[in-house]
Image (tube, rainbow, N blue to C red):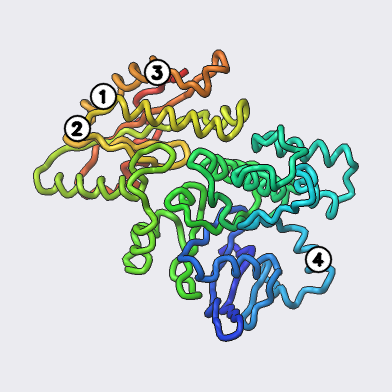
Amino acid sequence: MTQPLIRFENVFKAFGDNQVLRGINLSIRKGEITAIIGKSGEGKSVLLKHIIGLMRHDAGRILYQGQPILQLKKAERKALKRKFSYMFQETALFDSMTVFENIALPLVEKTALSKSEIGDRVREKMHQLDIDNIEDEYPARISGGMKKRVALARALVTDPEIILFDEPTTGLDPIRKNAVHSMISDYQKKFGFTGIVVSHEIPDVFYISQRLIMLDEGRVIFEGKPDDIQKASDPVIRQFIQGLESRHDALTGMTPQPQGERRYREEMARMRRHRNAFSIILLTVENLYEINKMAGYEAEQSALKRFADNVQGHLRLTDVCSRLGMNKIMLLLPRTSREEAEHICRELAENMGTCGVTEIQAYPGFCFSVSAGIAEAEQDKPIELLVAEAESHKNIFYEFKVC
């Protein structure tokens, strides 16, 4: 098994009589996004500060690539800290500095880049975050959402190996929240950094994470894949997840993934009792990333929202739409055979082709490229296998464009 990039072994931390970390054991894998979830006050932010070296643990060991951090020499610890970047929960912007100066600060302090090189890199990040026009503003004069994006630009500007995000989307509206998630995911895929995200955004954070860690009363009670936590039988885990889920995905208005999976199980139970057929259609926007290249992440998410609205407007009352990922929508069709699903899909493609998406109409010739895979359920077949079947090349029934 590959050695973890970061490992906690029985780590304890207390503040006076308040024991915050109670024997933490966990692993962070290189090149993945790990989300840390749990109730407020369970030690998530304290955990991040131990990872980056802002706090010293009372007992146990924290290892980086197999080496105990406390045993590193001073120069080695300094070199290790340069590999990290941190986006604080409250942004931690300097009020006396302009937006440009705040973003440039890590480059000024940690690199030997020229003034023009620093300017180029800062403006590139500002453009990618849709904050081009505020470089001379001060933090007190911009909105909370803008402050979040400025803080994210500052975290990304040094192209770090490891980025720690402490509640990066708190206070943002659904479009900007999903834009930040999309951006974190895209940057991770592009640069391969290791991301560690503390978040309460469930299930949104599941879409961008390869692994989840859940804390409860200062201990790790779950470590694994996002799909696995939704199958957990532990009542503490189930109560937490279900308590944070909303009835509708904040961006698309669709059923969130966990509720979509519950509806799938309900249809499977009906199939066992009454032998009712049902099918799924998996819609995948294949070129969503091209929109953010042209118009930015907020335009990308606005276009996805408009597309989702159009999909829901052309389905039957009994059909269930659920968001299955950053660019995937699953349509669950009760009492529907594969042949009937193909007919529905064909009609949907024809109707969607006449629905414009405002956010991309400013770019003549550009269209959403959508693939539609279809699969008919079989008794007791897990949803993961049916989705994989719909997603397989041989089951891509239709490809259409929305302009």
| Residue holding disc 2 | 336
Q: Are marks 4 and 3 in contact (CB under 8 Å)?
A: no
In the image, is residue 376 above or below residue 78? Answer: above
| Residue holding disc 1 | 344
In the image, is residue 321 above or below residue 201? Answer: above
Secondary element at image label 1: helix
Q: Amino acid under label 4? A: Lys
Percent position (x, y) of residue 304?
A: 46, 31
Q: Would you call the spot at circle 2 few (<14 residues within 10 Å), some (14-19), or many (20 or more)?
A: some
Distance Cα–Cα, label 1 vs label 2: 10 Å
Q: What residue is at 31 percent from the left and 26 percent from the top?
A: 313
Q: Are marks 1 and 4 in contact (CB under 8 Å)?
A: no
Q: Would you call the spot at circle 1 few (<14 residues within 10 Å), some (14-19), or many (20 or more)?
A: some
Residue at the farthest left position: 274
- Tag 2 or tag 4, which sits nearer the N-term? 4
- Tag 2 or tag 1, which sits nearer the N-term? 2
Percent position (x, y) of residue 220?
A: 48, 71
